[in-house]
Amino acid sequence: MDIRVQNVLKQFSRYPALNDVSLDIRSGELIALLGPSGSGKTTLLRLIAGLETPTAGRIFFGDDDASSKTVQQRNVGFVFQAYALFRNMTVLENISFGLKVRPRATRPPRAEIRKRAMELLDLVQLSGLHDRFPQQLSGGQRQRVALARALAIEPRVLLLDEPFGALDAQVRKELRKWLREIHDKTGHTTVFVTHDQEEALELADRLVVMSQGKIEQVGTPDEVYDRPDNPFVFNFIGESSNLPVEIDNGEVWVGGRAVGLGAGDTPKGAAQLFFRPHDVELVNEGAALAGVVAASRRVGGTRRVELEIGGDAQRIEIDLPFDHPAGDKTRIAFRPKRWRLFSTAR
Amino acid sequence: MVVSPAHPAKAGWTFVKPSVVPGFGLTFGYTLLYLSLIVLIPIIGLFLKAAQVPLEDIVRIATAPRTLNALRVSFGASFIAALVNIVFGLIVAWVLVRYKFPGRRLMDAVVDLPFALPTAVAGIALSTLYAPKGWIGWLVSANGPLHLGWKIAYTPTGIVIALIFIGLPFVVRTVQPVLEEFEAELEEAAATLGANRWQTISMVILPRLMPAILTGFSLAFARAVGEYGSVIFIAGNLPNVSEIAPVLIVIKLEEFDQAGAAVIAGIMLVIAFVMLFVINLIQAWARRRFGDV
């Protein structure tokens, strides 16, 4: 089921949570809504589910205008961050809830419901726990039950709101891999919200980066990581360093010196230079960015060094091998291997 | 009191559980003393008084039709009133928690009035309203515009109404906080799974409220069993018909039959205790079943 979000606006008492957002989600795709808190990602998810109604704009499921339908009619699977399992029901009862509440005409017979629920329990690797109550399960197990419950109604689309946000790092990684497997097995169109970029980059077919109620960029993880459309995305996705520079003669200038970086088609004038701290090479000769080590710290296998560049002491970060001898005040010259320029001239 | 961690307390049967919060001895002693002074000693005194009565007299008083009828009216009316209060108390709590409307705070305060009002005042007001010539009593009487021929005051129905009045706040005040903390996500989850409003309420919300409802029920019931002031005005106090056990006890006392009064009181106490104990067991079960509400 492909989903089209068309010029959707959502206002909560005056201030807009979503501002004219349009998005096409392809059938069978695993897509991540990524952004800082307050970016409107959860609002967008809830609008697709029908848990909120848009102030303006429409949402289509296939050719079907879903905006006029209630949550119940939309047939979406929704997984909450805090699981939202029914505590008065066993695991099996939780999973079969969606089938049991169907009107008699479309409700499968009791044995069939039980069989389906057991199969789903198998799928989420919790067979044998059907008689437990949710409060007897661990967080990771609860979220698996929540997913099985959402899958039981054969949803047209699966929506997950920060599904792993309440779990510890180890379990989160495990479930991430497992969700990918389930998605590949069942083929549901899946939208999940996260503020964890690592999760989004690893899991999703495509990313939707949002900030302040707007979509900043849509693309595959590689596209978004390698070719961010704007400074926000570059900053938000992955590590980044940036430096105010001047563009002249098709070259990048810092403090009145060319630094050996081509400016491409960036217009003349002020700009921001962005690069990844790990994506640099140290150089001994030729034009380069040069700075003095102001601070350094060991991060796992690398050493992250803060450099002060130029007269006005702009600080940027680069990664060096952890055994690099650079100490305080050491002068280091380097060139980013890949970089992007965003013009700030007007 | 020294607690050695080398010998962990056996669950269930030991007094002291190792705890980082000091003061167990002091607070436990205080609790025992307080409960004894306020609750246990008067009750023991009551049973001692009743024990002075020869056994055949106890049986005679206990099985007298007037006693049995009074007990039946007392417990029956209390039970019905508590049931009615569950239903309407739940609705009142729901409205107060779920909707925002002008006058909500005022209505919230009104719920507590039955706590504060002297019960005699409530009794007089109710009996005036529900008497055959009162506003409501006249409406439903044979002479009223509806020609219903109902009689409320001076019948067991009147007793039930008085007991509903005094029991209402208990249910509202126990259910309200649970309802306030109820996670909206549970309702949303039910909705995304296709449940309609009624299914959500009956399968998701009510089970979660169950322990609170039971607490409210037992409080309202216990309060109703012991109620005296409001009932005597509206009940009519006809022996065997609308005479509650507390009234019978007072009558015995006025006849200087202290032993008889003590026996009836003792019987009431035992029945009430057994009922409350059973409700407590159900509650404990419901807590385990429906989670830590």
Image: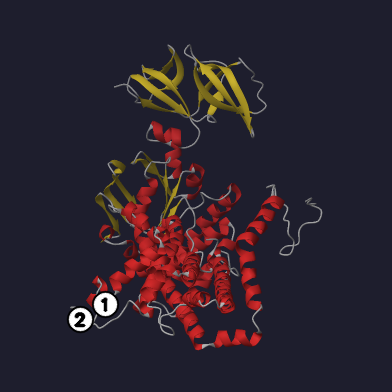
Q: Amino acid at mark 1?
A: Pro
Is residue A261 shown above or below B251? above
Q: Tell me the SS state at disc 1.
A: loop
- Judged left or right of residue A195, residue B280 is right
Q: Nearer the viewer, residue B87 or A84?
A: B87
| Residue drawn where x is 69% and y is 51% of the image | B24
Is residue A177 shown above or below A329? below
Q: Amino acid at mark 2?
A: Asn
Q: Position of residue A30 (x, y in %)?
A: 43, 53
Q: Quadrant of residue A324?
A: top right
Q: Residues within 10 Å of mark 1 (few under 14, many from 20)?
A: many
Please name the residue that numbered disc 1 is placed on. B132
Q: Position of residue B112 (x, y in %)?
A: 40, 58
Asked whether disc 1 touches disc 2, contact meaning CB atoms under 8 Å apart, the reply is yes
- Judged left or right of residue A161, residue A317 is right
* Residue A22 appears in the rendering: yes
Q: Position of residue A322 (x, y in %)?
A: 65, 28
Q: Tell me the SS state at disc 2.
A: loop
Q: Quadrant of residue B14?
A: bottom right
Q: What chain is tagged by disc 1? A: B
Is residue B98 shown above or below B124? above
| Residue drawn where x is 45% and y is 44% of the image | A221
**Disc on the earlier residue, 1 or 2:** 1
* Residue lying farthest to the left in this orientation: B145
Disc number for residue B143: 2
- Judged left or right of residue B164, residue B226 is right
